[in-house]
Each structure stands twice: as C-alpha cells, then as structure tokens.
Image (tube, rainbow, N blue to C red):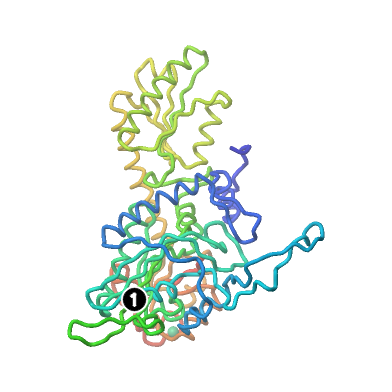
C-alpha cells in the first residue's frame, strides 16, 4: 500500500474525493494511454464478483455466452442510419496492419508501412449490434430458432476526450446482451426482464437503489425503438445511468436481413433487443456508499469481507493470537466468506485498521491477548461501531453483521435518494433546486423535445427516465413543469454523469 494520504472530504471537492478513494483503495489508475484506465486487482475483483452474480442471473433466464470479434468492417456501421450517426464521432479505426523500420533513431525509428493499408478500414467495436446481427442473419432460419438469447462479456472502445475512472474511459469492460424474437411482444418482454435483472442486481448486490423507466427520444440508444434504464442518485446528487436495455424493434433486422420463416410459412424480420452494464457500475458503487475514510463496499461485492487483525506485544502473544486468528479465518472461509488474516510485523494495528478501512472491508475482527483471555474478539464495522463478540459462535455473528450492513447500506442510500428528490415543483422551484445541488426532480412533461432541450440548456438537467408506475407520484401531474402545457407523462430530471 502506498503511503497513507489524506482523502479530500466529499463536502470540499466531490471529484477530488472520488479520485482519492480510488487511489487509496487501489481500484484503478490512469494509464500511459490517454483516456484509458488500468483496473488494479482490488478493483478487478469487484468486477469479477459483479460478473459472476450477473452471469448467474442471465443464465437462469435462458441466456448463453458467446464471443464476437473486436473488429467490425466500417461498412457494417453504416447499415443502420441512426446507429452510425450515434457512434460516428467516437470510433477508433484500424487502417493499416504493418510498421516498417526507417533506419532513424528514437521515436522516428518506425513508421506506418503505406503498402499495408486495409481495403476497408475496421472499426474497433463501440458496441456489437452490427457484427452480431450479421451473424444472426446466418444462424436464424425459422421460428424454431427463436428466441435466440446471447450475451457477450467484452471490452469496447468509444473515443472519449474527458476521462473519469470507471465513469468515462475510452476503453471499458462490459457485457452486451443481444437477442432475437418472433414479435414485438416477445422482444418487449425480454427488454423488461433484463431491466428487472439490472434493478435486482443494483439493489440486492450493490445496495444501490434505482429508478426504472423509459428514455425519451433524445436520450434513447442510437437505432433503438425504446430504451429502458436504471438510474441511481450519487452522493453529489448527480444521476448515474447504471444500465440500459433496448427494444431495437426491426431496425437492425432490416439492415442486416435477419429473417425467419413463420409457423404459417411466411417470411418475417426478427425483433431484437440489446442491453448492457459496464465497469461504470464500480463508479456507482463507490459514489453511493463510500465516505471520507475511503471505500465502503457492500458485503456481497467486497473483495475482502472480513479482515482479522491480531494484536500482540511479545512473540508468545503473537503465536497465540495469530493461531486463533487463523482458526477463525478457516471457520469463516468454510461458509464461503472472503477473509484476510493480517499478521504483518511491519505495521502497527492502527495503521492496519486504516488500510482495511480505505479498502472498504465491511467487517474487521480485532483479537488481542486480553480479548483471548475473555474468549472474545472485537467486531468492528466499516460503517461504524465496535462490538465485543464471543469467539464461540463467531461465524454466525459475522454472517449476521454482514447481512445487516448490506441491508443498512441499501436503506441509507434509499433514504438519501428520497431526501434529495422533489415532486410537483414549479418552474422556479425546479431552477432553484438544480442550482442548489440538484437531485431527482419529478414533474409533468408536455412531451415536446424543444421543451426538453431548453431545460437542459438552462439547468443542465436531462430527463433520466419517464418513470415506471411504481415510481410515479400518487397524483399524475396535469401540466408540464416547465412550459405549463398539458402534461402527457411524468418525468424525472437530474443533472447526470
Ligand atoms: Zn413543456
């Protein structure tokens, strides 16, 4: 661990704080390549745990994993008009395949070999709809081949000029699901099923409450019929789009000729969905729970769930407390928990506590000679509080504490999100709210894109979703919060990442 550095308090500078938490917890680092990040082992472990949980849910709903190429012929991207429009300004292109020596020294020692120019440039995938549906056209013949439910775990590249670790990087890791269906209803059901999985994952695993709903035309995915999203409110009251699920309609099927023979013998285009979550979720996890002492990881996704720190003065004591610590570690690991025993001689206990806290470890067990004499350990929670706990039955106590912490983190995040939401505000109140730090603002919307654009221009707030019924206000708004025209739907606005 690097020398302990002060973490900038959230209240002072949220963005600095975010960077400090990541550095202290050794989650990620900036790379020599501008716009790209290196995910360090502690951060990558969180991603692996997220992957495992999500992958189980995808599998349980009938999806299978596959892998498609990193490179996409440039002409593929042009086949769906809205799609190319949406991604044209952020693609990385491969145009040559060879370098050659120049005979010079230093940076000029090699150059692009002009004779290696590709006939057709290759796009580094920003997303894989085009290459996957080109394959679907080959694989799908009849209604018996449907639904086709695939998922891919991969990296994608979207050329970004501004970088924020986990939130906005040129290359990021994600999963992208791609499915084909016989009709609109089945595609719609799929898009909704996935939205439900994303919500469940966010709430049950990340302890991050979300609002679900549909995006407006201006915020939907390029080429989609409809985009659904989960949106969460971070501690700085900015919204984070944490996952999207698209009903693509027949747009891509028509562009790539994905047709199937119906039961009646006719020929129809399939209906597609695509959906994804990315390493951005790690940014969401950090900004939902962490505090001025560093990372707070929800127990279910914490790379280390329990850190055992024995305390000793003499060699004799060291042997004793370490021996008991080792036994407790073994017992905890038998129940599937992720445990570390910290017997480093190079650090004092206080310094060890500080480290495990910055790493976000939910539970720390301190075992000193006096604790041992009374048959107990001290159970310290990352979220506050120390309790003497009998060694007899300590596995049960630790498991219960982890469950409580998981639930308490969710409850606290939900209370914070609700506290920073307003409903039924007037235009003036809305402007005031967004100026004063913002949050989720629920209100009537006339459905007019120019109204939406004006709000964005004046307040920097965008419609995050048109919320699903369970999130809507009890009384449907009658007029547009901004222009006063009749409201066609309720909307949730926020300034967003
Ligand atoms: Zn309006």
Where does residue 126 sit, x and y in percent of width and height? 51, 69
Residue labelled 1 has its Cβ within 8 Å of some atom of ligand 1 = no
Disc 1 on helix, strand or loop?
Answer: strand
Q: How many callouts does the rendering have?
A: 1
Residue toward you, 317 or 62: 62
Instruction: Tell me if residue 225 comes above or below residue 1 in the rendering.
Output: below
Residue toward you, 124 or 394: 124
**Residue situated furthest right in the rendering:** 104
Where does residue 299 sit, x and y in percent of width and height? 38, 44
Left or right: 409 in relation to 36: left
Placement of the N terminus among the 4 image quadrants: top right
Q: Tell me if I can see residue 43 in this picture.
A: yes
Residue at point 58%, 68% (across, down): 159
**Ligand 1 found in image quarter:** bottom left
Where does residue 16 sit, x and y in percent of width and height? 61, 53
Residue toward you, 486 or 362: 362
Quadrant in the picture for residue 7: top right
Left or right: 388 in relation to 38: left
Where does residue 298 sit, x and y in percent of width and height? 40, 47
Instruction: Tell me if residue 254 comes above or below residue 31 in the rendering.
Output: below
Q: Tell me if I can see residue 473 in this picture.
A: no
Quadrant in the picture for residue 112: bottom right
Instruction: Tell me if residue 242 comes above or below residue 269 in the rendering.
Output: above
Q: Residues within 10 Å of mark 1 (few under 14, many from 20)?
A: many
What residue does disc 1 label?
272
Residue at point 35%, 56% (across, down): 54
């Amino acid at each position: 661990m690097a020398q302990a550095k002060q973490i900038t308090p959230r209240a002072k500078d949220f963005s600095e704080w975010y960077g400090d938490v990541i550095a202290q917890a050794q989650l990620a680092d900036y790379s020599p390549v501008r716009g790209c990040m290196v995910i360090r082992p502690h951060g990558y472990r969180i991603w692996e745990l997220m992957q495992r949980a999500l992958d189980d849910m995808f599998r349980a709903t009938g999806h299978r994993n596959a892998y498609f190429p990193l490179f996409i012929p440039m002409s593929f991207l042009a086949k769906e008009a809205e799609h190319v429009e949406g991604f044209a300004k952020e693609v990385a292109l491969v145009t040559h395949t060879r370098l050659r020596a120049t005979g010079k020294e230093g940076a000029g020692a090699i150059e692009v070999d002009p004779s290696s120019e590709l006939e057709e440039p290759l796009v580094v995938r920003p997303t894989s709809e085009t290459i996957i549906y080109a394959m679907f056209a080959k694989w799908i013949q009849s209604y018996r081949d449907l639904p086709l439910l695939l998922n891919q775990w991969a990296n994608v590249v979207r050329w970004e000029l501004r970088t924020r670790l986990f939130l906005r990087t040129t290359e990021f890791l994600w999963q992208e699901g791609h499915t084909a269906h016989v009709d609109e209803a089945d595609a719609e059901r799929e898009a909704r099923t996935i939205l439900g999985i994303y919500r469940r994952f966010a709430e049950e695993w990340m302890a991050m409450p979300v609002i679900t709903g549909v995006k407006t035309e201006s915020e939907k995915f390029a080429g989609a019929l409809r985009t659904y999203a989960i949106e969460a409110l971070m501690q700085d009251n900015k919204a984070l789009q944490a996952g999207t699920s698209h009903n693509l309609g027949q747009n891509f099927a028509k562009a790539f000729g994905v047709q199937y023979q119906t039961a009646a013998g006719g020929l129809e285009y399939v209906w597609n969905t695509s959906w994804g979550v990315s390493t951005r979720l790690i940014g969401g996890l950090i900004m939902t729970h962490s505090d001025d002492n560093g990372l707070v990881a929800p127990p279910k996704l914490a790379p280390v769930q329990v850190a055992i720190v024995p305390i000793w003065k003499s060699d004799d004591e060291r042997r004793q407390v370490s021996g008991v610590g080792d036994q407790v570690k073994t017992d905890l690991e038998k129940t599937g928990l992720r445990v570390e025993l910290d017997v480093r001689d190079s650090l004092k206990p206080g310094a060890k506590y500080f480290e495990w806290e910055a790493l976000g470890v939910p539970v720390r067990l301190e075992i000193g000679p006096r604790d041992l004499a009374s048959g107990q350990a001290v159970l310290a929670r990352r979220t506050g509080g120390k309790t003497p706990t009998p060694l007899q039955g300590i596995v049960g106590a630790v498991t219960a504490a982890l469950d409580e912490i998981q639930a308490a983190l969710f409850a606290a995040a939900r209370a914070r999100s609700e506290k920073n939401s307003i409903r039924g505000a007037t235009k003036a109140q809305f402007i005031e709210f967004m100026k004063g730090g913002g949050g989720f603002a629920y209100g009537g919307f006339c459905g007019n894109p120019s109204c939406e654009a004006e709000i964005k221009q004046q307040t920097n707030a965008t419609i995050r979703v048109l919320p699903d019924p369970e999130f809507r206000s009890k009384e449907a708004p009658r007029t547009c919060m901004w222009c006063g025209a009749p409201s066609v739907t309720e909307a949730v606005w926020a300034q967003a990442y």
